[in-house]
Image: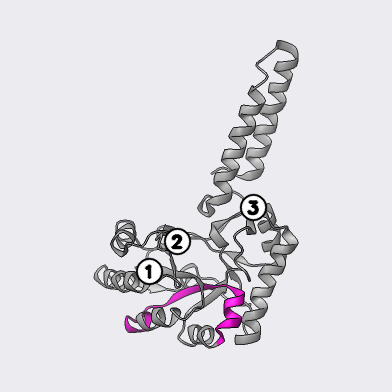
């Protein structure tokens, strides 16, 4: 799989070779621009697709998992609708992982505590979930992660170790912040697109056709149609004898320090 440093080194060599050919053999002057364009496109794809592990390695899928387990994950809460999600999970005796936004933890402390009390796992999803987080400095991102963890520690006395990137954005600055905070990045193997599309049928079928043991499924506990999708999904899991577990259970890692 392509890695950021390898791609950079490869394109630098190609660029140097192109400049050499232009100077000595009058190669077309636009060829370095084409190389830069290809480099930019590859880097953009790597920065917006966490599953590629282009900048750093994240947990996405438990390959060849011998047990009938998957991990349901929810982003962007806690929010009032999280309560409905929790009720449905309890009804089907399912566990999940909630990647929480720091300022929403501060705004909904009782919901945050209930998530933990009912045996689910919570993880870091930055403090502000800013749309331009991909352009922040490593120090600013580090403060975002530390502030989110501080909110969780203040309200629930826990120190979260799991982190999910807002919008799935990856870059060297996020990598530096993760190294400083010692957080474990977690991605997904199935993206439900419940935050992009409003049709429960479309979203459910998108998950249904892909699901298999070891999958990590991305949902959002802030979308109005997610509870309906979740209930249909949990019924499907029962039919397939699949159990929903937390991310830390699936990968056999610690969720808290």
Query: What segment is highlighted magenta in the picture?
Result: 89-109
Say whether residue 127 is magenta: no
Say whether residue 97 is magenta: yes
Relative to 220, say whether 20 is above or below: above
Q: Can residue 151 be seen in this view?
A: yes
How far across and how far down the image is residue 190, in percent?
41, 58
Q: Which of the 4 image quadrants contains residue 224?
A: bottom left
Farthest top residue in view: 25
User: Which of the two residues, 171 or 77, is positioned nearer the viewer here?
Assistant: 77
Mark 1, residues whose alpha carbon is within 10 Å: few (<14), some, or many (≥20)? many
Q: What SS does tag 3 mark?
A: loop
Rounded to the nearest angstrom, the CA distance separating label 1 from label 3 is 31 Å
Relative to 38, say whether 241 is above or below: below
* Side of 88 where 44 appears, left or right: right
Rounded to the nearest angstrom, the CA distance separating label 2 from label 1 is 9 Å
Tell me if label 2 and label 1 are in contact, CB under 8 Å: yes
Residue 56: mark: none
Q: Name the residue under label 1.
A: 69
At 42% from the left and 59% from the top, the residue drawn is 196
How far across and how far down the image is residue 252, in percent?
51, 70
Rounded to the nearest angstrom, the CA distance separating label 2 from label 3 is 24 Å
How far across and how far down the image is residue 171, in percent?
64, 52
Which mark is in front, 1 or 3?
Answer: 3
Mark 3, residues whose alpha carbon is within 10 Å: few (<14), some, or many (≥20)? many
At 60% from the left and 86% from the top, the residue drawn is 156
Q: Which of the 4 image quadrants contains residue 178?
A: bottom right
Q: Mark 2 points at which residue?
A: 62
Residue 171: mark: 3
Which mark is in front, 2 or 3?
Answer: 3
């Amino acid at each position: 799989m392509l890695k950021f440093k390898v791609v950079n080194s490869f394109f630098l060599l190609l660029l140097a070779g192109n400049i050499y050919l232009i100077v000595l053999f009058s190669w077309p002057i636009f060829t370095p621009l084409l190389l830069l364009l290809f480099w930019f496109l590859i880097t953009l794809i790597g920065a917006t697709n966490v599953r590629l592990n282009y900048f750093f390695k994240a947990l996405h899928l438990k390959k060849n998992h011998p047990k009938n387990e998957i991990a349901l994950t929810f982003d962007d809460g806690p929010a009032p609708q999280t309560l409905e999600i929790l009720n449905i999970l309890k009804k089907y005796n399912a566990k999940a992982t909630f990647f929480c936004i720091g300022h929403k933890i501060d705004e909904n402390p009782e919901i945050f505590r209930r998530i933990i009390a009912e045996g689910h796992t919570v993880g870091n999803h930055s403090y502000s979930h800013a749309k331009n987080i991909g352009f922040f400095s490593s120090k600013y991102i580090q403060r975002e992660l530390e502030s989110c963890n501080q909110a969780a520690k203040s309200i629930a006395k826990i120190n979260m170790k799991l982190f999910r990137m807002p919008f799935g954005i990856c870059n060297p600055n996020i990598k530096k912040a993760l190294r400083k905070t010692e957080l474990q990045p977690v991605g997904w193997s199935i993206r439900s697109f419940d935050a992009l599309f409003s049709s429960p049928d479309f979203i459910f079928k998108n998950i249904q056709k892909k699901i298999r043991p070891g999958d990590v499924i991305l949902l959002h506990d802030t979308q109005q149609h997610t509870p309906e999708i979740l209930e249909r999904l949990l019924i499907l899991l029962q039919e397939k004898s699949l159990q929903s577990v937390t991310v830390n259970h699936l990968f056999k890692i610690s969720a808290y320090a």
